[in-house]
Amino acid sequence: MSVPIQLINGKRESESSATRARVALVTLGCAKNLVDSEIMAGLMAKGNFTTTSDPADADVALANTCAFIGP
């Protein structure tokens, strides 16, 4: 079961500034949104987030999908 958490400026509300929220960035789709995911990962790093490849280890899972290119 997922439990919602409150994030403020990339940190969990109840934690110290030394702890960074973990985000799993899952990219599904075309090469264009892979580039978008890389940009988002860079912005998250600047915004005091840590990325992880395993959604089970993350505080937040973000799925980036492609919906504008046909088969």
Image: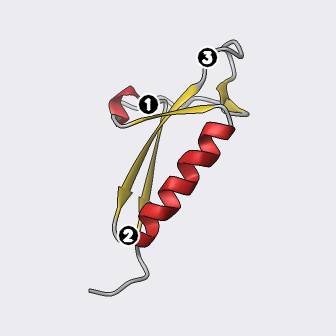
Comes first in the chain, label 1 or label 3: 3
Q: Residue furthest bottom?
A: 70
Residue holding disc 2: 31
Residue holding disc 1: 58
User: Is disc 2 placed on a helix, strand or loop?
Assistant: helix
- Tell me the residue at 73%/34% (across/down): 9
Tell me the tag on residue 50: none
Mark nearer the viewer, 1 or 3:
3
Comes first in the chain, label 2 or label 1: 2
Mark 1 → mark 3, Cα distance in angstroms = 13 Å
User: Is disc 1 placed on a helix, strand or loop?
Assistant: loop
Image coordinates of residue 54 in percent, x first then y, are 33, 34
Amino acid type at circle 2 is: Ala
Amino acid type at circle 1 is: Ala
Residue holding disc 3: 19
How dense is the environment of label 3, judged by Cα within 10 Å: few (below 14), some, or many (20 and up)? Answer: few
